């Protein structure tokens, strides 16, 4: 089935603005979804799924497999040019009170020191800078050929953000690490140095973080691509699914990406979500508040690695056009 890509402010069907329709058949998918309750507010695959099951957020992957075809993703194998260079390192983060790992990738034909636009890629729950991008590594992401066209040249960085949903916590501030430490470090190396632009991208928890960074720092992050962002509409939903996501209702209100979309009025935005993703109702609510012109892609799929990987090429192509073209 084809995805339904549209732009904000134009033509989201009324039936798409609710997680389930009041009328119509009670499919097994719908019965299962309702039966999962708050414990199924997060569903993952691969690294994300294993971590969430281990933490008791999920009752197990079998429930996901019972959804008749809901998680099937029609995706082409990615096509790449020969990859450019990449390197990894560590720095001591004052904001996170620990050493933080990162990987920097450069596009084909470029070398360290070249001045380029920059994409800050945020990983999902349970992941890190080494496996932040589903289905490929950072150098491959920059070497993608999408619809027969290579990406415009830009750099990309992944970084360890921990499990704290990319906003400040009492003893760990991954947001401050990105804004006050990582970006200045890379600008000193030519990446994202004005007039070159910076964008942000993320998957699941990282998708939420990317939206939050773009909302709170619009002058720094000029474009955002969020794949299956892990967003809730209330603090109770969030705390029931993951008690470590927010420290308090006040923290949720301050760093809730859904209710602060007006701050994206000058930012290029792309958001993608699977129809059977348990976060989808929150993403629908978020999409309803996005500025006119934002790209919204609601497609068949779940909160799985297959869906994430299928959305990486169009998300990278979007950022390439928004930041460079």
Image: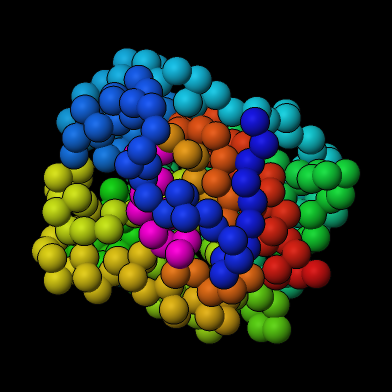
Instruction: Please state the horizontal and vertical placement of residue 293, each as a whole percent of the image.
Output: 63, 70
**Colour mapping used in the image:** rainbow
Image quarter where the N terminus lies is top right
Magenta residues: mostly which secondary structure? Answer: helix
In-front residue for pair 115/168: 168
Asked if residue 66 can be seen in this view, the reply is yes
**Residue 1 lies in the magenta-colored region:** no
- Say if 227 sits above or below 233 in the image: above
Residue range in magenta is: 277-288
Task: Classify residue 169 as left or right of residue 184.
Answer: left
Instruction: Please state the horizontal and vertical placement of residue 126, each as a whole percent of the image.
Output: 34, 39
Asked if residue 157 can be seen in this view, the reply is no
Q: Which residue lies furthest to the right in this view?
A: 148
Task: Classify residue 86 as left or right of residue 20.
Answer: right
Q: Which residue is drawn at 21% across and 27% down?
A: 35
- Say if 36 sits above or below 289 in the image: above
Task: Classify residue 38 as left or right of residue 262.
Answer: left
Instruction: Please state the horizontal and vertical placement of residue 315, each as a whole percent of the image.
Output: 64, 52
- Say if 28 sits above or below 234 in the image: above
Image quarter where the C terminus lies is bottom right
Q: Residue furthest left?
A: 248
Q: Residue at x 27, y 58 (%)?
A: 233
Q: Residue at x 79, y 38 (%)?
A: 80
In-front residue for pair 323/271: 271
Q: Residue at x 34, y 33 (%)?
A: 43
**Residue 283 lies in the magenta-colored region:** yes
Task: Classify residue 233 as left or right of residue 78.
Answer: left
Toward which corner of the image does residue 67 lie, by quadrant? top left
């Amino acid at each position: 089935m084809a995805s339904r890509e549209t732009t904000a402010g134009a033509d989201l069907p009324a039936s798409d603005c609710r997680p389930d329709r009041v009328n119509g058949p009670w499919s097994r998918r719908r019965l299962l979804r309702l039966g999962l309750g708050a414990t199924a507010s997060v569903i993952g695959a691969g690294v994300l799924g294993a971590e969430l099951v281990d933490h008791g957020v999920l009752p197990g992957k079998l429930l996901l497999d019972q959804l008749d075809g809901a998680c099937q993703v029609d995706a082409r194998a990615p096509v790449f040019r020969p990859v450019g260079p990449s390197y990894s390192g560590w720095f001591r983060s004052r904001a996170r009170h620990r050493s933080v790992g990162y990987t920097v990738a450069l596009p084909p034909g470029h070398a360290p020191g070249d001045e380029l636009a920059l994409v800050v890629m945020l990983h999902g729950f349970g992941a890190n800078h080494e496996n932040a991008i589903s289905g490929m590594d950072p150098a491959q992401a920059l070497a993608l050929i999408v619809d027969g066209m290579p990406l415009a040249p830009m750099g990309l960085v992944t970084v360890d953000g921990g499990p704290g949903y990319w906003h400040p916590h009492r003893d760990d501030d991954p947001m401050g690490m990105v804004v006050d430490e990582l970006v200045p470090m890379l600008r000193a190396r030519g990446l994202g140095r004005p007039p070159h632009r910076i964008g942000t991208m993320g998957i699941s928890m990282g998708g939420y973080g990317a939206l939050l960074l773009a909302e709170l720092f619009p002058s720094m992050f000029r474009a955002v691509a969020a794949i299956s962002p892990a967003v809730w509409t209330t603090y109770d939903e969030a705390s029931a699914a993951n008690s470590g996501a927010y420290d308090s209702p006040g923290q949720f209100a301050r760093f809730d990406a859904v209710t602060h979309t007006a701050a994206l009025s000058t930012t290029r935005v792309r958001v993608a979500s699977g129809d059977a993703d348990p976060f989808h109702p929150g993403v629908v609510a978020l999409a309803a508040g996005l500025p006119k012109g934002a790209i919204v892609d609601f497609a068949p799929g779940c909160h799985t690695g297959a869906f994430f990987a299928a959305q990486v090429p169009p998300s990278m192509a979007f950022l390439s056009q928004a930041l460079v073209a």
